[in-house]
Image (spheres, rainbow, N blue to C red):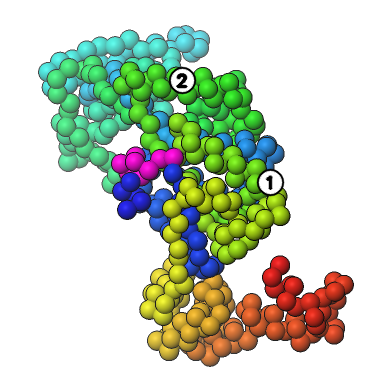
Amino acid sequence: MILKMVEEGKIAGRAMLFAGPPSTGKTAIAMGMAQSLGSDVPFTMIAASEVFSLSMSKTEALTQAFRRSIGVRIKEETEIIEGQVVEIQVDRSLTGATKTGKLTIKTTDMETIYDLGMKMIEALTKEKVLAGDVISIDKTSGKVTKLGRSFAQSRDYDAMGADTKFVQTPEGEIQKRKEVVHTVTLHEIDVINSRTQGFLALFAGDTGEIKPELRAQIDAKVNEWREEGKASIVPGVLFIDEVHMLDIECFSFLNRALEGELAPLVVMASNRGMARIRGTGYKSPHGLPADLLDRVLIVSTKPYEDAEVREIIGIRCQEEDVTLTPDAVSVLTSMALQTTLRYALNLIACAKVIAKKRKAEAVAVEDLRRAYGYFMDEKRSVEWVKSQAGRLMFEEGEGEGGDERMDTR
């Protein structure tokens, strides 16, 4: 339902919360959403603790995440030259410093000769363009694209590689107008406009703080393009994992940002029940303040059942290229239900190493039992700590009587 609403652009500016115990697939659902939406819809994934570890203010980090999740689809018309190369002539001067040349290009209907400058000769040489190739040249940028070799030039005695692609000679005019659609995010537009070396800052990742005045100018320009029909807005998805780690200031900012004109769908995930809101003394469900909880659609995730766990273990074994015997699959499934799914999945690789040592192809029950003996899960670890209460160092006030306090914290 949510994916359909995102694709139709109907749910932008709303928020959702995946709430459930650990290992119930909250992050997995988000990853699945990202894959299903495809490359054209922006999907940004952040962990709440990232906001505090960056070298910029919390609100700036959140604003950048928001703007990364909104795409602008820009339409532009470009002129292209498309045809089959008949001949390339390159004349070098006596010193070899300057090059000039002629390019003869044809379609089924016409043939034209173009004069070439230094840059075009370099571009054609870089693409290894030869007579008989079908090429496309973008007139605005001068980019040369090799589409393939012409069928008219294919002969039985030609030495061709296996990857040589044959195409038909283009028809009609050599110069054509073509509509190109680019999708860029608002954050990319911000960065490119905020720095003199903006384009390079995108790759370096050193974007720094971006002035609000600049963002306002960009928003105004994007709205202008929308009215002229040059661009359309693609609201994406921002996924915030472990959202209870944000503090009260971030939550207040989120509240306001969701009301903004350009806002994506915000999906949050939390594995807390009643938890203290960071930065306050109050407790609330999932560690989110009441006014934000009121805005979100809450989806609860439940622990997996026997058949689902078995299926997940099967998929994981395929990915890790491990063969489990049918008995081992049953034992690992029961281990996952008694301990946690993450612990059981970690045992697969350990058991494979043990099975390799005894030169077995498939992982058997005995290998899993040995791995289970070597590595503790969380419950056994807690029991061991309790049994070692006399020997281990505890903080003052803990130890025998302090266990309850340790658990709740």
Q: Is residue 65 left or right of residue 55?
A: left
Label 2, label 1: how far apart the Cα atoms are: 32 Å
Query: Which quadrant of the structure image shows residue 307?
Result: bottom left
Residue 142 visible in the picture: no
Q: Is residue 300 above or below residue 359?
A: above
Q: Which residue is mark 2?
A: 220
Q: Which residues are magenta?
A: 6-13
> Callout 1: 10 Å neighbours few (<14), some, many (20+)?
few
Relative to the observer, which residue lies in front, 45 or 104?
A: 45
> Callout 2: 10 Å neighbours few (<14), some, many (20+)?
few
Which mark identifies residue 53?
Answer: 1
Q: Is residue 165 above or below residue 396?
A: above
Q: Is residue 272 left or right of residue 84?
A: right
Q: Which x, y percent locates residue 234? A: 38, 35
Q: Which x, y percent locates residue 218? A: 49, 22
Q: Which x, y percent locates residue 162? A: 28, 46
| Total numbered circles | 2
Q: Which tag is nearer the camera, tag 2 or tag 1?
A: 2
Q: Is residue 56 above or below residue 373?
A: above
Secondary structure type for disc 2: helix
Q: Amino acid at mark 1?
A: Ser
